[in-house]
Image: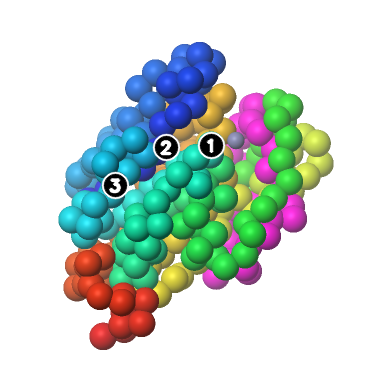
């Protein structure tokens, strides 16, 4: 399994509070947390500031699953990289969209809706309830997962009906949220998972890492995704060949 963890990597460099939680950056924290859970995986990281945001054609062609964390700089992701990532998903690359990346260009493109939601930063307690215990992403996950303090993300979440819903969150303020949603787009599998606000150490929570490792395995389809590459011409219209 070849995994690329993409992070815009801005909060961790600018905000001392976030720096303290993720001194290595969210991308490296995710690699560190996932490595022991995914023995056969090869990890690389990529960030916004790199040339082509670290996502050149050959980088994506050799990626089976891409994890995406972004918040402040969605609009700085270039058209070219957006098209490339979108094409690769349609050709079978897995995509795991994390937390505030619900507003990333690539997720909105894949969903075709605004992907807006309600939110509040007030140290809410979040409980993630498994609503699909047979799903591979829920395998071995105790529920509910408790995040003692987290940002509230609430409904209405403007996404198309997920193909499969795996987790629903409730918050101490009373709100609920579809926090783990699966979508098929072209040949690719897409999983949106909402935990991961930058001022809480969510990506060190063992249950959160367990879910993410399951999601990587679920989204990984190398036998499909290697058939074609991001450099294929006009990929969206020829993906079924
Ligand atoms: Zn947030």
| For residue 17, above or below residue 138 | above
Q: Which residue is mark 2?
A: 8
**Who's the residue at 32% across and 61% down the image?**
84
> Is residue 163 rendered magenta in the image?
yes
* Between 121 and 209, the one nearer to me in the picture: 121
Q: Which mark is residue 129?
A: none
The reply to whether dot 3 and dot 2 touch (C-beta < 8 Å) is no
Q: Earlier in the sequence, mark 3 or mark 2?
A: 2
Q: Which residue is at 50% across, 45% downward?
A: 74
Give the labeled residue for mark 3: 52
Q: Which mark is residue 72?
A: 1
Q: Position of residue 27 (x, y in %)?
A: 36, 34
Q: Is residue 238 above or below residue 169?
A: below
Q: Quadrant of residue 42?
A: top left
Single out the residue that lies furthest toward the right: 174
Residue at (56% x, 24% y) in the render: 199
Left or right, 200 with respect to 36, comes to: right
The part of the chain drawn in magenta is: 140-168
View quadrant of ligand 1 = top right
Q: Position of residue 171 (x, y in %)?
A: 73, 39
Q: State whether residue 166 appears in this view.
A: yes
Does the residue at mark 2 contact the one at mark 1 (Cβ under 8 Å)? yes
Towards the viewer: 181 or 133? 181
Specify few, some or many for label 3: CA neighbours under 10 Å numbering under 14, 14-19, or 20 or more. some
């Amino acid at each position: 399994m070849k995994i690329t963890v993409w992070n815009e990597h801005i909060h961790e460099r600018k905000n001392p509070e976030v720096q303290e939680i993720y001194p290595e950056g969210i991308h490296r924290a995710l690699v560190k947390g996932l490595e022991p859970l995914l023995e056969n995986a090869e990890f690389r990281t990529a960030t916004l500031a790199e040339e082509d945001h670290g996502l050149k054609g050959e980088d994506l062609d050799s990626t089976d699953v891409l994890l995406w964390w972004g918040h402040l700089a969605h609009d700085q992701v270039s058209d070219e990289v957006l098209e490339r990532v979108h094409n690769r998903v349609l050709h079978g690359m897995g995509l795991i969209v994390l937390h505030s990346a619900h507003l990333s260009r690539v997720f909105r493109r894949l969903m075709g809706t605004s992907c807006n939601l309600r939110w509040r930063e007030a140290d809410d307690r979040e409980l993630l309830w498994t609503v699909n215990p047979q799903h591979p992403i829920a395998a071995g996950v105790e529920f509910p997962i408790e995040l003692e303090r987290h940002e509230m993300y609430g409904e209405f979440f403007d996404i198309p009906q997920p193909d499969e819903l795996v987790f629903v969150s409730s918050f101490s303020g009373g709100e609920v949220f579809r926090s783990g949603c699966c979508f098929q787009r072209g040949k690719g599998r897409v999983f949106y998972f909402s935990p991961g606000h930058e001022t809480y150490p969510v990506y060190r929570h063992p249950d959160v890492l367990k879910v993410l490792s399951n999601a990587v395995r679920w989204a990984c389809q190398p036998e499909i995704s290697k058939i074609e590459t991001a450099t294929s011409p006009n990929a969206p219209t020829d993906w079924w060949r």
